[in-house]
Image (tube, rainbow, N blue to C red):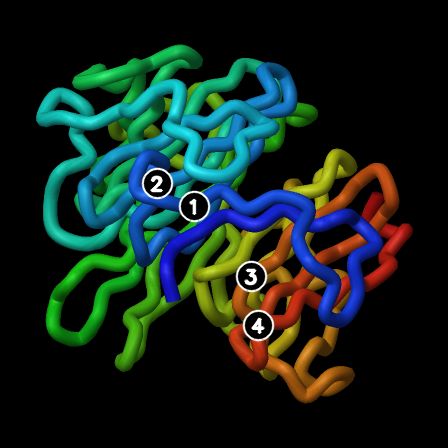
Amino acid sequence: NHPQIAAFSRLAKENTPPTRILEGQKTLISRTMHDLAYDPAHDEIVVTSPLTQAILVFRGGANGEEPPVRVIQGPHTQILGVGAMDKVTVDPETGEIYLPTAKHNVVVFPYGANGDAAPIRVLGGPDTQIRFAEQTDGSGNVPPIRVDPVHNLLIVPSGGFRGGNGAAALLIFDRNASGNTKPLRVITGPKTALAGSQQIAVTPKGWILGGSTGGSIGIWNINDSGDAAPRWKIPVRQLTGLNVNGVGIDATHQEVMVPTGNGNVVMTFYFPEIF
């Protein structure tokens, strides 16, 4: 398989062909990208190129072998280091790009950043409690993070060891937090049933969707703290027999989308309560 970004109509069903495919050498898209973001304010698509340690920005309607309009790459970006920088998010109001790195921090670039651009903010340090999951061999693995512009927050999953044991937490920061800043709140503990760090989303009403035990999507509130049990669960594996490999939301249509590696399927659930 070769790397590509495929766009489908919202109501696409089984065996529906994509409406557009972005692929080819000129796109600079590489393998091991596990997240992408859409900037609605500027109609742009943002994706990482982990093998070249770069961030690629495309126009929203990009198609075929279309090159990115901007490429953030170089030593001043601070996205160099061990591990794949495969997750990215965009502040939908400002267009700022947030990238978690294997250095256990979050680097933030302004809208329009290009080339060897330095971040405008770096969030990291012992007081932040940011510690991304690690393989048992010590290699890095970063989770997706999400911006909540409605409540001015940044949600960062932390902890856990793939192939081993470790705590898991959701760290809630001020959206503009920088340096060695403590989180406003921390959701962690056995009652949280947090499991997996490869999926997270936040709704405009302040509901956080994330991986939970038993192949489920758990839902917490942005005001939760400590050992808070999820308010709701979507028992994806129980309902479908399929694994959870991510989560996305369509707030306009009150839908939750869950991709799975089982047959490359995207499942859609209607969940008006959280919207």
Pick the quarter of the image with the C terminus. Answer: top right
Is tag 1's residue or tag 3's residue first in the polypeptide sequence?
Answer: 1
Q: Secondary structure at mark 4?
A: loop
Question: Can you identify the residue that label 3 sits on?
Answer: 246
Query: What residue do we see at 34% from left, 60% from top?
Result: 159
Q: Are marks 1 and 4 in contact (CB under 8 Å)?
A: no
Distance between the Cα atoms at labels 1 and 4?
A: 18 Å
Question: Can you identify the residue that label 1 sits on?
Answer: 23
Q: Position of residue 68 (x, y in %)?
A: 38, 26
Mark 2, Cα crowd under 10 Å, few <14 / some 14-19 / many 20+, is many
Quarter of the figure with residue 96: top left
Q: Are marks 1 and 2 in contact (CB under 8 Å)?
A: no
Distance between the Cα atoms at labels 1 and 3?
A: 22 Å
The dot on residue 46 is none
Query: What residue do we see at 29% from left, 70% from top?
Result: 161
Q: Are marks 3 and 2 in contact (CB under 8 Å)?
A: no
Mark 2: amino acid? Thr
For the residue pair 224 and 7, the one nearer the viewer reads as 7
In the displayed structure, 176 sits above or below 148; it is above
Pick the quarter of the image with the N terminus. Answer: bottom left
Question: Can you identify the residue that label 4 sits on?
Answer: 264
For the residue pair 105 and 187, the one nearer the viewer reads as 105
Q: Position of residue 108 (x, y in %)?
A: 35, 24
Mark 4: amino acid? Asn
Q: Position of residue 157 (x, y in %)?
A: 44, 52
Is residue 131 rendered to the left or right of residue 209?
left
Is tag 3's residue or tag 2's residue first in the polypeptide sequence?
Answer: 2
Distance between the Cα atoms at labels 4 and 2?
A: 21 Å
Is tag 1's residue or tag 4's residue first in the polypeptide sequence?
Answer: 1
Is tag 3's residue or tag 4's residue first in the polypeptide sequence?
Answer: 3
